[in-house]
Amino acid sequence: MPPRKYPIGAEVLPEGGTSFRVWAPKRRSVHVVLDDGAAVPLERESGGYFSGVAPQAGHGTRYRFRLDQGDAFPDPASRFQPEGPHGPSQVIDPARFHWTDSAWQGAPLRGQVMYEMHIGAFTPEGTWQAARRELPELARLGITAIELMPIADFPGDFGWGYDGVGWFAPVKLYGEPDDLRQFIDDAHGLGIAVILDVVYNHFGPDGNYVKQFSEAYFTDRYANEWGEALNYDGPDSAPVREFVCANAAYWAGEFHFDGLRLDATQQIFDASAENIMTTLERSFRAAALGRKTFVVAENERQDTNLARPCSEKGYGLDGLWNDDFHHSVRVAATGRNEAYYTDYRGTPQELISAVKYGYLYQGQRYTWQSKRRGSPAWGLAPAQFVTYMENHDQVANSGTGERLSRLTSPGRFKALTALLLLGPGTPLLFQGQEFASSRPFFFFADHRGELGTLVKRGRIQFLAQFPSLAQPEMYSHHVDPCDPRTFERCKLDFAERTRHAPIYRMHRDLLRIRREDPVFRAQSPHGVDGAVLGPEALVLRFFAPDGDDRMLLINLGRDLLLEPAPEPLLAPPAGKLWDLFWSTEDPLYGGSGTAPLSHGTPWKIPGHSAVVMMPGPEMGPCEI
């Protein structure tokens, strides 16, 4: 066999022809059936692999694997499925694309401003080429990293992508693989990293043929809430682990992705000496060939060991999604704490603690689940926590798909946005959040027949945990996730950047402050402290080594008069006075103006607002 880049799949050879390799341990024979009807036998290797070369196959050739002279199936490691997961696989030659990002050095997690994007709903066209047009504007906004929702091939004409079945095949709905490469190449040219949301905890239920090749992909030793658990630690698990690690390396090597977001890692079960997440993360970094990369995890249990170094018995990942921050912000914004928001009050102290410590629950009892939640986060840096006010799950789980900007007052939304974008965590915006999109974002999946019925029923049952959504009068407002119109309603309207110009300008200005101000940019461990100023008000003080501190005052209630002000965090740096630097109530942001915070007089912090103070002139007598 000629040398191969990856252990599985179809690889075009420099001298012509294509090398094929597949794992099918219980099969007696495997043939590659080409689109012209030719059947090329593969030789059996040790370990259950079959391999061979088809001299007549090249870029664009379509093929399937015929197993034991019976039915033929798509390649589990197919690089493209032009007719979807049930159709033939297609040989792809990545060398045909000419990259222009040789000067790109990659991106670490620290310092990023992330932007979650669903390619199908991001533009009216829903394609890579259409999304490319918007990259310059995202760069002007201040976005430094795009996080793509899953793109592994899935059935139907629309979907979130979390039921992917062709893990190596970018779904055909958005364009061809080279269109994805061009998107990433353009992003790198604008200084934007691109990371991919990957699902390594289950395969989707429709179009999954890996069991035809080996039942050892799965295990019944663990209960997985979305289907069969993957076999990462049982008999014949080594090729499964190799499959996943090859997939991670493939995204870094052939597409120049800068990072991964691992979906629902609490459903990745592995009792091996080295967890599969550590192994695949190492494969991804090695394939990046020295570029800076980062891997973050979603983990419902809030296991902080995922983000600790291997030398400390951690998993070696870079960061964690922080649902605690989101849940507390949402309750603070809306005043509602049904269902999984039950254990959050949205109080100033919660917001302060989320900023200072990352997770709020680090082992305390969690009423909603009747058990303890989380693990200690001591020693983790602020940048290791990805913070957000919106993401795909949380917007959709509102039931009506409404954005947070439409569920709270404009002032509260702006004040909490300042908390998000100036805080020391790694902020993430969900597409359209930056201009307060009026478009909803629902759960949508193009499943039909019995599976479609099950998906619809399952969605209603999930939302029923919210008592308000379980009422009969709400039934007619539950959208059908399998209806194409549900998907179409989610597509962004970029004209709202102009119609909602004040809020868009505020996001741009906050990101400029974060980028240019050395104190807000620092994300220093222990670099911020906070105090409660009132029932809905707080202060955060960002410390600078030279004493040039910054102060963020947030008031989600009515006007607050700071008299008296017996809080040390309000005291100005030695020999200085505080000056108003920035306010959400600036008329440029649709605000009503901010009364002067005069030296020597009590401060009045306007309701539903955030203001930033910085050291100004020399202090005089009797001045705060």
Image (tube, rainbow, N blue to C red):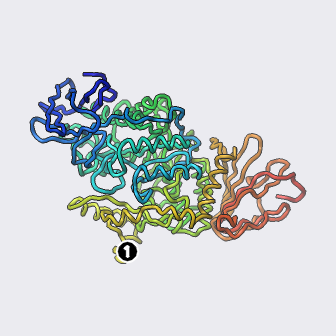
Give the side of residue 54 with respect to residue 341, left or right.
Answer: left
- The local secondary structure at tag 1 comes to helix
Position of residue 191 measured from the top left corner of the image (x, y, whole percent)? 56, 42
| 27 vs 10, nearest the viewer | 10
Crowding at dot 1, Cα within 10 Å, few <14 / some 14-19 / many 20+, comes out as few
Q: Residue at x 72, y 65 (%)?
A: 605
Classify residue 481 as left or right of residue 582: left
Residue 321 x %, y %: 48, 48
User: Which residue occupies 12% across, 42% down?
Assistant: 71
Q: Relative to 68, does residue 468 appear above or below in the rendering?
A: below
Quarter holding the N terminus?
A: top left
Q: Residue at x 36, y 42 (%)?
A: 177
Answer with left or right where residue 574 lies relative to residue 55: right
- Up-down relation of residue 125 to residue 593 (above or below): above
Q: Which residue is mark 1?
A: 474
Q: Amino acid at mark 1?
A: Met
Q: How many marks?
A: 1
Does 381 appear above or below 236? Answer: below
Taking the image as shown, residue 267 lies to the left or right of residue 427, namely left
Q: Position of residue 500 (x, y in %)?
A: 57, 66
